[in-house]
Image (cartoon, rainbow, N blue to C red):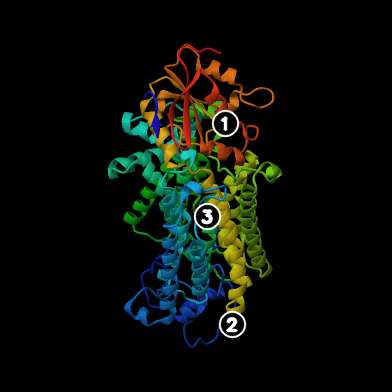
Amino acid sequence: MRIVDGVLSGGLSAPGRGGQTGQDDDPTPAPADELLADLTVIHPVEPLEVPAPPDPAATRGADAVGSDVASAAEEPPPTLAIRDLADWWFVAGLGVLGAAVGLWIRSLSDAHAWTMNELGVISVLPPTFFVAIALLTFGFLTMTLKRSPRRSLLAGYLLALVAIVHATPAIVARTLGNAWAWANVGVVDAIQRTGDLPESTGALAAPTEWPGAVAFTAMAAEVSGVDPATIGMWLPTATSVVALLALWTVFRALTSDDRIVWTALWLYVLGNWVGQEHLSPIGFGLVLALALIAIALPFDRIGGDDAPIGRNLGPSEETPRTLAATVAVVALLAVALVASHPATALVAAGVFAVAALTRASRTWWVAGALVVLSAVWFIGPARGVVLDDPLSVLEPDGSPAQFATQTTSGLSNLTTNAQIVLVAGRYVAQAMIVLALIGIGLRLFRRRPVGLLAGLAAAPVVLYLVSPGGESALRAYLFALPWLAFAAALALSELTPSERPTGGWVAKAVLIVGLTVPFVLAQSGERGAGWFTSEEVSIATWLSDSAPAGTLLVEGSSNHPGVTTNVERFTTVPVAELVDADGSVSVDELRSRLATPGQAAAFVVLTRSQQQGETIAPRLPDGELERLEATLRAAPDFRIVGESRDAVVFTLEAGATS
């Protein structure tokens, strides 16, 4: 950098918890007559002699969303032990996993971020990266052939997938991506310095109106001593792991078949291509909502094949101390969720309401608590926002994804690579929805209940109905994705029966690979659209630290690191507000804005990422930012005060006027 002059239907059974009998921790199988009594509630039969109680291991997976015989009496699933070393199946799976991880790590050393294009990080990675993904997918699919797969091994595969998906951009780019994540970092800096939130304007509106994410990040930075930008870099990886842990808890309660559980988790990762795990209100809120659902839904028994899963369900019989602790945790998560992202809190309330309506759980109290807390927040801290625009709480939070919110009608304005990314993302979302519908349809065809699952998947649609638009549809898809992934896993289970393992494996592999390829394209492209080089970050940091209070910052677009510290000193204006009738930037209007009296300083910032952002979501004529930079370099009254390989900062010479 050179310096010159100075962002379903079904019941849930929490792991380790049984039904309402209070015998959750008793590993002894229930007597045969008790099991028969349970089953006759659903399938009345004549009293028959029962020679022996059913083998729990033989019934695992018998029902796509659970079986009464798969109760607390079930033997614990196999876990990692010394004897596993003699299990060739386990050793082979572990070897494939190790090879995939090794190839992934090796591929990172050959990546050079500065050559990245619209395809994102995959455009700079060697073939070994793609071989690693192929091996990981092959190994995972093979491990799920077993009726009782080893959870420890499947967890290793899933964690490796999360690392490849979310850690690769951080390792290759070595900087925090996404302009909105940088805007949140600026708010975190203000909290650390002043102990208070900055004024709610522009890009700072969302994190200051719903401060849960930035408050948590500020606390984490203070406790750990880690820079907020570094926390932001690794936040997608961490939040994805937490989300998967919560969903693992929920999915295990929906079915006794581990293959469906782990397949649903894998599909959830593949379906989540829109890149909203960054430091933002919605990213933090979604994780809190999933954690709340995993803890608060007291699904205690799994229903039979033909019975509504909600039948005979209710709160588990807990001691007063345990119940009090659960309520305290639920209350804490609910308050944090409302303060982080109210739209997510309302969707979570819908989840609990659906569970109660389908009699899967008595969760009206949680739904009511979320609604009441949201109302208190709206008439209290967020009163001004609600009075200005009551529907704003259900609208996007100002942190849109780049490709995700674009429509296919504008394909002709995009480069070929950008078109590939856009189409791939749409394909993933549509394929996930189609697979989910197939799963629900097959259950209906087999006359199995689907009320809970269908209700959970459909509940987020209210976001789109209240505020139609591309980004609202994106939010609805994200909130519905856990249930879509589970329904899609049901479809794969039905379409690939275990009675024909070879044919089933091939069919499942074709479907999974058919999702993996477009997912890699879409997710990489979405992350790449918000990637910033270290040169851009250096310029942004220098300007944020050195500019005086009362500074005007004119940006080529918002797609750059922006103001990383001292956010209260700056007022930002995009050049798109300074255009002529033909859409080109008016240099005379720019001069007038920079020379406005009362400003301590005024700068124009143009960067590589702004130009790339215009190829994805154009607001100006093609090549306008490049022409503006050339014009300002040639103008005698503009002076360069800071420049790096990928960014340049101009100011108007003292005394110059429009």
Vertical placement of residue 281 versus 27, above or below? above
Q: How packed is label 1: few (under 14 Cα within 10 Å), some, or many (20 or more)?
A: few
Q: What x and y, as percent, mark residue 321?
A: 31, 55
Residue on which disc 3 sits: 122
Q: Label 1 vs label 2: CA separation?
A: 60 Å
Q: Quadrant of the C terminus?
A: top right
Foreground mark, 3 or 1, reads 3
Q: Quadrant of the N terminus?
A: top left
On the question of residue 285 being in view, the answer is yes
Disc tally is: 3
Residue at left offset 43%, top offset 39%: 535
Residue on which disc 2 sits: 46
User: Are the two marked residues, 3 and 2, in contact with CB atoms closer than 8 angstroms?
Assistant: no
Residue on which disc 1 sits: 390
Foreground mark, 1 or 2, reads 1
Report the front residue among 363 and 590: 590
Residue at left offset 53%, top offset 17%: 593
Q: What x and y, as percent, mark residue 496?
A: 61, 73
Relative to 350, 28 lies left or right: left
Q: Secondary structure at mark 1?
A: helix
